[in-house]
Image (tube, helix red, strand yellow):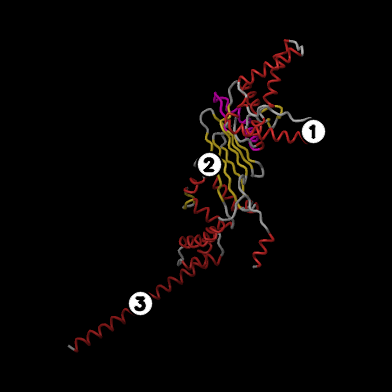
Amino acid sequence: MRDSTKEAIDNAKKAASMLGEQLKEEAKDLAKEVGAKTQEISAKLVKQLRDKTDAGIMECKNALKECAGNIEEAIEYLRKKGLSKAAKKADRIAAEGVIALQLSKDNEKATLVEVNSETDFVAKNEAFQELVENILELSFKRVLNDTDSLMQLTIQNQTFEEYLKQKIAIIGENIVVRRANTIVCKPNQIVGGYLHHNKKIGSIVLIECDDSKNLEKLKDLVKSLSMQVASMKPKVVSYKDINIDFVTKEKVAIIAELDKENEELKRLGKPLNRIPEYVSQLELSESVIEKKKDELLGQLKKDGKPEAVWDKILSGQIDRFIMDNTILDQRLTLLAQPYAFDDKKTVEQIISQKSKEIGDSIRVVKFISFELGEGIEKKVDNFAAEVAAQMK
């Protein structure tokens, strides 16, 4: 019994010794493998990781060591480190940046995007501009009209949301894809666009006609209308797009504004503003126009004007009456605005003129206009307070 016990103990010792030798050999192999990886990390992989992440040399080297030389895991490791920084940046206000426009050569499709950064300096950064190009290209290709859809798309084998966060970490500022809109033409439609040279204002305009053969003749018109929208900033196409309750409220404000101006004009001895009875064509019903015509016609008779010229004079007087009583339309609607390239005519008159010229009926369907940072409340830094806070 004792002999068998001793033999079992001897066998166990031999097995333990053999296992120890095996573990030593495996440890040596592992050391060689790690050594090989470490050697590779010091050169090739570090460069690859830097190219992919734009992180520093030591950051890349440490990430590869942490991930045993696995470059994909190292990218994720750096991204996670960068994302914690990006989260802090997301609290900061991004009100600078650029507007970007893409218009197809056939004028059948156009996309407008706004991408915000914290500073104008970063907006001129090459990496930021590349990001904007990718956003614009994706939005144009996928006909996007919201930024949520953009975030779900795939770019460079990752979601756009992850790609954007990675860029935020690299660029070093909060970046916001604020809005994106795309217009795709239907039959008998043409779209134009305009981007101001400072990339802070952009617009796209969609118009239509009855005969598709005339679309080519409308390229210059739709371009000029896009410039009109960008420069004059209308809110809607026509007075028909305005609510009558809004008109009633605005009339009170406009009349009060003109009364206030007249006080100063009177003091200076200058001609006073006309106080309108109406402010929008929404208020100018057929009965209002007919009543005014009768009034003006009675005055023409009273003044002894020849009957042969009544129609011509009356037409001009009615046009003037409408102009004087559509101040709100002129401020807010595209069609009622003075045309930027001939302010003696309205945009509606220019379109009517072009319609007669080509023997067709031209209509503005819609427009989209972006102004950089519009509606964003910018932070005003208090330098003294900032220094005081740092001194605490």
| Magenta residue span | 206-230
Q: Quadrant of the C terminus?
A: bottom right
Q: Is residue 54 or residue 362 the one in the foreground?
A: 362
Q: Residue at x 44, y 71 (%)?
A: 34
Q: At label 3, which amino acid type do we have?
A: Leu
Quick check: is 216 in the magenta stretch? yes
User: Along the polypeptide, which appears first: circle 1 or circle 2?
Assistant: 2
Q: Earlier in the sequence, mark 3 or mark 2?
A: 3
CB atoms of marks 3 and 2 within 8 Å: no
Name the element at disc 1: helix
Location of residue 298 (image quadrant): top right
* Residue at which label 1 appears: 266
Q: Which picture quadrant has residue 329?
A: top right
Q: Looking at the rendering, which quadrant does residue 6 occupy?
A: bottom left
Contact flag, marks 1 and 2 (Cβ < 8 Å): no
Q: Judge depth for marks 3 and 2 and give the one in front.
A: 2
The residue singled out by tag 2 in the image is 140
Which image quarter holds the N terminus?
bottom left
Q: Amino acid at mark 2?
A: Phe
Crowd class of label 1 (few under 14; some 14 to 19; many from 20; radius 10 Å): few
Residue 227 falls within the magenta-colored stretch: yes
